Structures are given as C-alpha cells and as structure tokens.
Image (cartoon, helix red, strand yellow):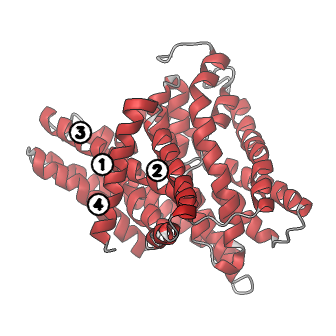
Amino acid sequence: MNAFNIIALLTVLAAAFSYINFRFLKLPTTIGLMAISLVMSLLIFVVNYFVPGVLTEAVQLMRSIDLSEVILDIMLSFLLFAGALHTDYERLRKYIAPIISLASIGVIVSAILVALAASMILILFDIEINFVYLLLFGVLISPTDPIAVLGILKEAKVPKKLEIKIAGESLFNDGVAVVMFLVLLSLAKNADSVTALDVVQLFGLEVFGGLIFGFAMGYIAYRLMRSISNYEVEVLITLALVMATHVISVYLHLSAPLAVVVAGLLIGNRARGDAMGEQTENYIDKFWELVDLLLNAILFVLIGLELLLVEYHINWLLAGVLLIPLVVLARYAAVWPAVQIFKKRLELLPGTAAILTWGGLRGGISIALALSLPEEMNRELILSLTYTIVVFSILVQGLTIKGLANRRLGMSEDA
C-alpha cells in the first residue's frame, strides 16, 4: 500500500472513530480514539481465528508505517507548534522556574528511579537486561507527553493555575528528554569512545542551540508577518516556519522540538495583536486547531493499532503492570521537591504535587523512542513495558485527572 493510501485509510479511521466516540461514547477525543483503536486491534485477533490471514494483512500494514519516524520527524513539530501557539507566555513565565526544574532535574531523577524499579521487577521474572538499557527505558518513559497532555487537558477542565504548569512542562520536557535519550543511546553504542566533554557539548548544542535557533526563526517569521497584511500568506508563513525550523534543526543537530516550541511561543504571543490583524489571527488559530485535531486523531488511532505489533509474553505483561505504580511513584518523587521549593513564592495550591503526578501522561513519544532502539538493546521487551504503561496512562490517568483535581483542590475550573 502506497503512502497516500495509508494516509487516506488512517484519516478515514480517525473520522469514523471520532464520530463513534462523539455520538456514543462521549469520552475525551484522544482517549476515545485510542480506546476504539485498541478494541479494533483486539477484534482483528478474534476475527483472525475465523478468517485466517486478516491478522497478517493488518500486521503488514502497520509494519509499513514507521511510527517512530512518523511521530518524531513528522507529527511532533506541528503538534508542539500548535500547542505553543495557544500558550499564554505571561502565565508560563511566572512558573518557568518549576517548569525548567521538572523538565530537566525531574526527568533525570524519575529516569534513575524507574530504571532501579524496573531492574528489581525484572529480576522477579528472571529477565536479564543491561542496566544502561533500563536507564534508556527510564528516560523515555519519564517525560510527560505534550501530545497526550495538551489534548486531554483541553477537555479535562483542570484549574488554570495547574494547567499552565502541566502544559508548560510537557512542551519543554520532551525536547530535553529526547536529547537525554540520544546522548545515553550514543553512550550505550560507543561507551569506549565517548567522553564526558562530548556529552556536555552534545547536550549543550542540542538544547541551547535549539532554543536560540527557534527564537531566531520565530523572529524572522514575526518580522515577515508584520510587514504585510494578508491572512493567506501569513498562514503559509507559519506553516513554512514549522517545516523549516524542524528540517534545519535536524541538519544542524539541534533540538527541533525545543526550537519549534520557542518559535510557537514567539508567534503566539509577540505576533498576536502586533503582526497579525484580527482576520489573520482568526485564520491562523483555526488552521492550527485543525492541524492539531487531525494529527492528534491519526496519532491516537496509530497508538491503539500499534497493539498489533507489540510482542507480549505473560512475564513481560505482568512486569509492565507491576511497573505502573512504581513509575507513578517515581514521577511523584521527581515532582514533590520542586513543588516544595516553589510552593510559597508561587502560591502553589495544596494537592499540586498529586495533580502534577497524575496529570503527567505518557504517550506517543515514549513509544516512538522505544521503537527507535536497536533490536540488540532488548527493544521488544522495552516496547512491551512502555506500551503497557502508556495505555494505562492515557486511559486511566486521562479519564480520572478531572475528578482527582476536583477532589484534591475543591475549586472551579476557572481558578
């Protein structure tokens, strides 16, 4: 099946599942799409007993889609830009210190704790795995996924004071986590030839280079938009901005996610009302809302259908289930110190640590990073553990975050 047919099929499935969810299930869109896709995957297994060959065809179709490339190289930049475009920078700046703390130190702490927990769990099942590979697993499962978080927060009605912290962290920590993952992967592959200086230089170039480059690209786009008044051209400029920023960042070995987030924040805040007229602002917002809706729908359909490719053994499944509460506890251990440090200065609400922990959803980026691992690094085992945790995170945490916020905070959605 060629690329266009695959895109057409996924779009049809996304539209059909969206209709079923809106008409009957009435779940938050991303959760509903993933749930229906998981059910469809399970039905394919059942139908295969009566119509042999159906599973083979479905598996071949999914294998023709490189989910890691689709998420990291195609979808991620567009979705991050759409999220950053609608993020209030003034609100974000107020909480920038805890956001940076959670997106850096928090990810490191969580990754180490998850790796230690995974090593103990796997020992129970006599599964041997290099600890460095478990650190890779800890890094890829620790960051909150902006795609899952932003999509669900829109419908969960989490209080605004917490929403900006969760959304802000998710926008930045995936870029940092991807860099950490690449650095650690490089170390795992070339342990003898990589020095500490190489690690520092790679991390610094990717992160700070990405931030600076994103600002430069966003500023160029802002100046271009300010010099004209034509909504059609300005919409095209924002689209070109995302594509050019991503491609050039990858070429220069900079963090494309961080660059796109900075560019999106600049356009969404500096250009809004200054370089954009009312008509342009309306069209740009609607265009990127549509892009966000379409890509999110396709992505969560793909995540659900990925079940067809995940290799499961009973021990792997049990290990993944046992890891779920430990991953949540590791997230809490990473979040709690930052909340305590900034609690008084930022007037953080009681229950903030619990909400940040439960609202820190994992999603497609974790799966994409797991899929990017070489086979010799226990990729199938790590993918199985990751998929189990991601499914729990989106279906259970995503569905209950609103109720937890209401119970713990006891306040209205506009607080």
| Local crowd size for mark 2, using a 10 Å CA cut-off: few (<14), some (14–19), many (≥20) | many
Circle 1 residue: 291
Amino acid under disc 3: Lys
Can the viewer see residue 32?
yes
- Which of the two discs, 1 and 2, sits closer to the camera? 2
| Local crowd size for mark 1, using a 10 Å CA cut-off: few (<14), some (14–19), many (≥20) | some
Q: How far is mark 1 from mark 2, CA to CA? A: 14 Å
- Whole-percent x, y for residue 191 in the image: 73, 82
Q: Earlier in the sequence, mark 3 or mark 4?
A: 4
Q: Earlier in the sequence, mark 2 or mark 4?
A: 4
Circle 3 residue: 286
- Whole-percent x, y for residue 78 in the image: 35, 54
- Which of the two discs, 2 and 4, sits closer to the camera? 4
Secondary structure found at label 1? helix
Circle 4 residue: 8
Secondary structure found at label 3? helix
